[in-house]
Amino acid sequence: MAIIQCIVCNKRISSKAESCSHCGARLKGSTEEQLERAAHIQKLKQNRRWQSASFLAVIAFAAGFLLKFFPVGEDPELWDKVALYLMAAGFFGYIVIRLWMMFNKRR
């Protein structure tokens, strides 16, 4: 028994395993085309997760922007700081996620 990498998710599994315990791909009895399709679907799911995270970063930026110009509480300095932190977190989060997506696309 040896440790190999799953063709679909690239995680370590046993060479005697009939299916991957991480992604559930059937390794025994599957054609090369089926394994490639499963790998492609796995990559699409991961991309969708990163796109959702970038969308949340944009929402955080927009919420901070709205709080900056429409404070909701009696203490405007506190809401000004909260708005600034939300905008900064949203902006930098979006940039980092997009750079990560570009880096992973090239690999």
Image (spheres, helix red, strand yellow):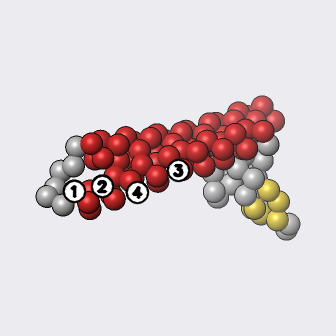
Task: List the residue tagged with mark 2.
Answer: 80
For the N terminus, which image quadrant? bottom right
Circle nearer the N terminus (2, 4): 2
Name the element at disc 2.
Answer: helix
Rendered location of residue 69, percent (x, y): 27, 42
Decide if residue 29 is in sight here.
Answer: no
Q: Which residue type carries mark 3?
A: Gly
Residue 50 picture quarter? top right
Q: Nearer the viewer, mark 4 or mark 3?
A: 4
Residue 79 picture quarter? bottom left
Q: Which residue type carries mark 1?
A: Pro
Measure how far apart labels 1 and 2 are at the Cα level: 6 Å
Name the element at disc 1.
Answer: helix
Task: List the residue tagged with mark 4.
Answer: 85
Is residue 34 found left or right of 46 in the rendered image? right
Measure how far apart labels 4 and 3 are at the Cα level: 12 Å
Measure how far apart labels 1 and 3 are at the Cα level: 25 Å
Name the element at disc 4.
Answer: helix
In percent of the image, x 73 and y 58: which residue is there? 11
